[in-house]
């Protein structure tokens, strides 16, 4: 059975106090999804997931403070710094009609407006100014901003994302 797709909703920034509580930066400060959870998964740079039971959570401005089962003391909390806080994709509410989750774009076939195949969305990269699709094709890799006029259609049922002006973006060798 395949593991469920996990979505990063925040990241542990640092300990809060000396008893093991941690501060979690929410990627979407308006979202309540990290509050009142019984468990979350922590993901490190290696991609490995670690299931964590949440003993307590509370809002703290735009942050969420967590107490995890088994994390006692500042040193144990410090060891979690920088880890992403994830939940299964299936735990997310359905997006509005005009919205998409980035994770739903990964794996879509990308084609140009004229129908030419450009590759597959390998991942969505979040930059401070814009989110971009990392599209891997036979001819290399390119980043395409998730903005009009570039992304013109997303058909999740067909698994296809249509773009225009892709030639405006540098083509790099595959990574």
Image (cartoon, grey):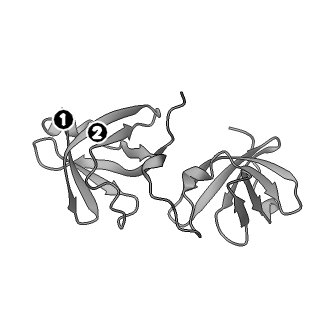
Q: Give the residue pinned by disc 1.
A: 71
Q: Position of residue 14 (x, y in %)?
A: 25, 48
Residue at (65, 69) in percent of width and height: 147
Q: Are marks 2 and 1 in contact (CB under 8 Å)?
A: yes
Report the side of 107 relative to 53 (left or right).
right
- Number of numbered labels in the structure image: 2
Q: Residue 6 vs residue 15: left or right? A: right
How far across and how far down the image is residue 137, in percent? 78, 44
SS type, badge 2? loop
Helix or strand or loop: what does disc 1 sit on? loop
In the image, taking residue 102 as reference, residue 72 lies left or right, namely left
Query: Between 20 and 3, which is closer to the camera in this rendering?
Result: 3
The alpha-carbon separation of the residues under discs 2 and 1 comes to 9 Å
The residue at the point 42 percent across, 49 percent down is 91
The single residue placed furthest to the top in the displayed view is 1
For label 2, the residue is 80
Residue 125 visible in the shown view = yes
Please state which of residues 130 and 65 is positioned toward the viewer in this rendering.
Answer: 65
Q: As displayed, is residue 137 above or below residue 31?
A: above
Looking at the image, can residue 7 be seen? no
Side (left or right) of 175 relative to 15 = right
Percent from the top left, x then y, of residue 88? 44, 44
Residue 132's place in the image compared with 129, above or below, is: above
Q: Is residue 150 above or below residue 44?
A: below
Badge nearest the viewer, 2 or 1: 1
Q: Nearer the viewer, residue 11 or 98?
A: 98
Q: Quadrant of residue 71?
A: top left
Circle nearer the N terminus (2, 1): 1
Residue 163, x across and y down, in percent: 76, 62
- The C terminus lies in quadrant: top right
């Amino acid at each position: 059975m395949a593991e469920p797709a996990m979505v990063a909703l925040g990241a542990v920034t640092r300990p809060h106090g000396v008893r093991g509580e941690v501060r979690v930066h929410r990627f979407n400060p308006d979202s309540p999804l990290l509050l009142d959870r019984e468990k979350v998964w922590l993901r490190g740079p290696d991609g490995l997931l670690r299931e964590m039971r949440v003993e307590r959570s509370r809002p703290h401005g735009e942050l969420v403070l967590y107490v995890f089962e088994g994390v006692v003391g500042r040193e144990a909390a410090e060891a979690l710094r920088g880890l992403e806080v994830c939940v299964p994709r299936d735990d997310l509410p359905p997006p509005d009609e005009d919205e998409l989750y980035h994770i739903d774009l990964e794996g879509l076939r990308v084609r140009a407006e004229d129908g030419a195949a450009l590759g597959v969305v390998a991942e969505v990269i979040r930059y401070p100014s814009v989110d971009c699709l990392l599209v891997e094709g036979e001819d290399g890799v390119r980043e395409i901003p998730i903005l009009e006029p570039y992304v013109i259609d997303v058909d999740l049922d067909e698994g296809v994302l249509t773009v225009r002006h892709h030639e405006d973006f540098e083509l790099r060798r595959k990574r």
